[in-house]
Amino acid sequence: MSNALKETVGRYGIWSAGLRSEDPSRRGELAEATAELEQLGYGAVWLGGSSSARNAVPLIGATSRIAVGTSIQSIWQYTAAESAASFAELEQAHPGRFLLGLGVAHAKNTDGYRRPYSALVAHLDALDTAGVPAGRRLLAALGPRTIELARDRAAGSIPYLVTPEHTARSREILGETPLLAPELKVVLETDPTRARTLAREALSPYLALPNYTANFLRNGFTDSDLTDGGSDHLVDAVFAWGEDAQIRARIDDFRAAGADHVALQVVDGNTREELPREAWRRLASLLG
């Protein structure tokens, strides 16, 4: 199933929290934007934040090919039974188009947070019982144990806020078959000061979340890299910025490290509601 999944999502996709809006007045705008992403050649749209199958419905309905996945759906927000019911409904209407991306979210933002790994295993057990196939679910896996779980109990991993080095280690653990689709933030700015300022604005909230900081420390960064919005070393590792050729080279670094697919998130300092459609067109052009 994973080889077919790799063909479905292609090499590149768009990660966007803005496309998961539940504002009815924006339904047409979101559908139109997703249809254009399909026309531009992207293979998948990843709905950022605490997204769900409900957010995917209008986007899938407006398109014919592009896959739509959650990145991520929190295991604390929806029960396995609720997830299975919405999955089955979408699967019946649009077979093969929806991907259930799951994660344990963050204790800081979650009531009742407890033993996240054990809770994730139990959630996957319940999804098995409810009939959601392992080949259509993905895990936001950062640490080695969760990457192994993505290998053994899902179709692969969709890690967020990672480096090419983490990608290489993930591929080693996953093996060849599972999908590995890291998210990568892109700043379409050539001035280093401006680019890193925008990057730090986006990065700073994540540096207050232990899931990410622990992963950075596990992957060779130091405490000094995690202060003041992140060191240049950290920013340059988890963002692509600069001339088009530099951005393309950074994306290629993830592919060379073992990524089957790279989910690109545009960072431009605007609000989530302002969809960066011109930037998505520019990225499609530089990706060829």
Image (spheres, rainbow, N blue to C red):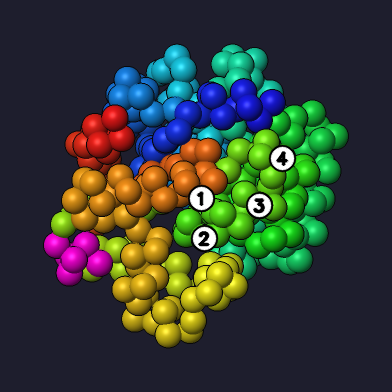
Q: Nearer the viewer, mark 4 or mark 2?
A: 2
Residue 164 appears at what percent x and percent y?
48, 56
Residue 14 appears at what percent x and percent y?
39, 38
Q: Earlier in the sequence, mark 4 or mark 2?
A: 4
Q: Amino acid at mark 3?
A: Glu
Q: Amino acid at mark 4?
A: Ala
For the N terminus, which image quadrant?
top right
Q: Are marks 1 and 2 in contact (CB under 8 Å)?
A: yes
Task: Indicate whether residue 193 is drawn in magenta.
Answer: yes
Residue 286 to residue 106: above or below: above
Q: Earlier in the sequence, mark 3 or mark 4?
A: 4
Q: Amino acid at mark 2?
A: Glu
Q: Nearer the viewer, mark 4 or mark 1?
A: 1
Q: Earlier in the sequence, mark 3 or mark 1?
A: 3
Q: Secondary structure at mark 4?
A: loop
Residue 135 shown left or right of residue 219 in the figure: right
- Marks 3 and 1, Cα distance to the nearest angstrom? 10 Å
- Marks 3 and 2, Cα distance to the nearest angstrom? 11 Å
- Marks 1 and 2, Cα distance to the nearest angstrom? 7 Å
Q: Amino acid at mark 1?
A: Ala
Q: Nearer the viewer, mark 3 or mark 4?
A: 3
Disc 1 residue crowd, few under 14, some 14–19, many 20+, Cα 10 Å: some
Which mark, by number, is residue 257? 1
Circle 2 residue: 165
Residues in magenta?
A: 191-196
Q: Earlier in the sequence, mark 1 or mark 2?
A: 2
Which mark, by number, is residue 172? 3
Residue 191 to residue 44: above or below: below
Q: Are marks 3 and 2 in contact (CB under 8 Å)?
A: no
Q: Secondary structure at mark 1?
A: loop
Q: Residue at x 59, y 32 (%)?
A: 99
